[in-house]
Structures are given as structure tokens and as C-alpha cells.
Image (cartoon, rainbow, N blue to C red):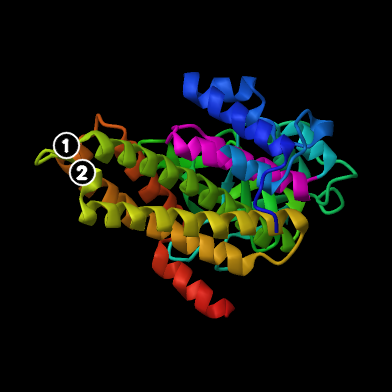
Amino acid sequence: MDFNLDETQQDLKKLAAEVLAREGDEERLWQAGLMGVCVPEDAGGAGLGPVEMAVVLREVGARAAPVPALPTLAGTLALARHGSPDQQRRTTGRVTLALREPGHDLADPPTTTARLADAPATAARLAGPPATADRPDSAGGGWVLNGRKVSVPHPGAVALVTADEGLFLVASPATTAEFASTGEPAATIVLDDTPAEHVAGPEAVEDARRIFTAAVAAQASGVLAGALELTTGYIRQRRQFGRALAEFQAVTMQIADVYIAGRALDVAMWSAVWRLGEGLPAEQDLALAAYHVGEAVKALYTCQHLHGGLGLDVTYPLHRYFAQAKHLSHLLGGADAQLDLIGALV
């Protein structure tokens, strides 16, 4: 693969960096069109793919911006790949992916169950018109879901939920608030005979997981890059015993370890999203990238150590990077779960 970004991707990277450097809140990202890069063109978006999603999310991570870009971009990309044109047109705003279940790894098959129910009851809860001929559930009526989804980031009006029968759209699901290390909204989605709209079959469940893993790895790559930049700037100007910290060999070796961790995550992440975009098998690359998301947390500990007491100050920017790194690793289940998955794949 070619690790260089093409002209469109470079322009997207520049735009994201400029918007986030000024007032990088959610509203500004929507206004700039960055939250709709994965929405199909027919639905009013840019119609771009996994690599472009990663470009935007890496810039979000590089500034540790507390915005719902990750679930929105991953959700709209999954819907663009598996949803009907009608579903894509109706779901262009904030959407989240609900994948993880209590007591199960992200890679485990979903235990949330789906069964057919009366169509009128489903249509009453769903946003937009009832099922039509171009939707998979039109012939057999509506669907209802039963189960729990945990660690759902930025829950909104619409969730893409994985179940035993495939991928489903759920409007305004019942939620229970969770605590996230970043302070951003997170929730458990409670599904008790909850009306849902069928999007695609079980084949879409694995693809949704791959997209979500790639999105988390891309944002984590940016988080580590931003923390590395902040730390290198600090050790260059901070002086001790009449010398800059960067002149001490022990310090240079530690910051080199952070750089290596960042490069390892970058290589695995870019390879994975490129393979996703090309329709090639990406499981091994994604598992490796997910493992290095966990390793990024260890690198953030080093960044904190090199900052001394300042690294623990919650008013200093490094705190946001550390919190995001922990949160992103938690979304994937941690490094041990990824090692188990790598072992199963090889």
C-alpha cells in the first residue's frame, strides 16, 4: 500500500486541522462538512470511505477534542455500506454504533436477540416513514430487540445496534448513563422489546465491528501524536541542572519509546483502513492496531512521567490526552483482549 495521502485526503486533513485549531466544537465540524464525510453523496454527504474517516479522526485525536466524531463517522460509514438509500437519507445526523455487551469481548458474536413483531408498533417509534419495499423488513413486519449494549459513546437520537439477526436502526433507545474517563457522554442502551428497523443481515455485524475498531485506532493514533508533540515541546524548554531535559540520555530514550509506539500504531492503523477501503481482509491489521491502542496508554504514562508533577495537573492539556487514551482502549476491551484475538487469528 501507499502510505501517502492523496490530494483529497490532504485537503481533508488540512481542513480538519484548521477547524479544530480554531473553535473545534461539534457545530463547527458539522458546518465544515467534516461530520458528513462518510454519508453518501445522494444523501447530502461527501461519500468518502474508511481512509478519509481515519484522516478526520486522527486530527480529532491530535487535539483531544471532546466531540462525537468517532461514533458519527463510524455509524454513517456502516450505514453507507449496508443501509438502503432511504435509510441513508433519513440518518444523516448524529448516530452511534452500539456493539459491546456486558461480559463479552467486542469480537464475540452479539447476544442481543431480534424477532419479528407487528409493523405498526415499530413504525410508531422509528423516525421517518414506516417500512417500504426497499427495506429488508418490509415483507415480514417490524422487529423488536432484547439485550443490553454497554459503553455506547455519545448516545443520540439514533443508534445502529448489532444483534443475532444482523444490524438494526433504533430510534431514541432507552439509556442508562455511564461514566467515561474523558467526561464525555456514554451510556448503556437498554433493549426490552424495543422497536427496530432492519438494516442488513449478520454479515454487516462483523463489518460494523471492523469499522468501529478502525475508527477507535485512528483517533488513538492522533491522541498519541498530540501527546508526543506536547511532551517533546516541554522537554526542549524545561531546564534542570542547567540543561534542557531533552539533553539527558535517559529522557531521550523514553521519548524515543513513545515515538516508536506511535509509529507502530500508525502503520497498523493506516494499513487496516486502506484494506477496509479496498475490500481486502483486514482482521489481522485491525487486531494489531487495536493492541497498539492499549500500548498507547502505556506511552501516555511515559509522557506524564516526563512532565513531572505538571503531568498530573487536570488543567494542563496532557490530562485530556491521557483520559482519551484510556477511554479509547476501554472501548476495544484492552490489550489483553486484543492479544487473545491476535492469537486466534494466527
Q: Which mark is residue 239?
A: 1
Q: Is residue 197 above or below residue 204?
A: above
* Element type at mark 2: helix
Q: Alpha-carbon neighbours of circle 2 within 10 Å: few (<14), some, or many (≥20)?
A: many
The residue most toward the right is: 133
Task: Name the image quarter holding residue 156.
Answer: top right
Main secondary structure found in the magenta portion = helix
| Disc nearer the start of the sequence (2/1) | 1
Residue 42 as seen in the image, left or right of residue 165: right
Most foreground residue, 257 or 198: 257
**Residue 149 in sight from this viewpoint:** yes
Q: Is residue 225 left or right of residue 127?
A: left
Percent coordinates x, y for residue 75 in the rendering: 64, 43
Q: Does the stretch in magenta take in 186?
A: no
Q: In the image, what residue type sits under mark 1? A: Arg
Q: Residue drawn 56% across and 20% down? A: 28
The label number, if any, that marks residue 48 in the structure image: none
Which of these two is toward me, 219 or 261?
261
> Residue 77: image x %, image y %?
69, 44
Residue annotated with mark 2 = 245
Quadrant location, the C terminus? bottom right
Q: What residue range appears in magenta?
A: 57-83
Residue 21: image location, x then y, percent? 48, 24
Residue 81 position in % (x across, y down): 76, 49
Q: Residue at x 52, y 66 (%)?
A: 288
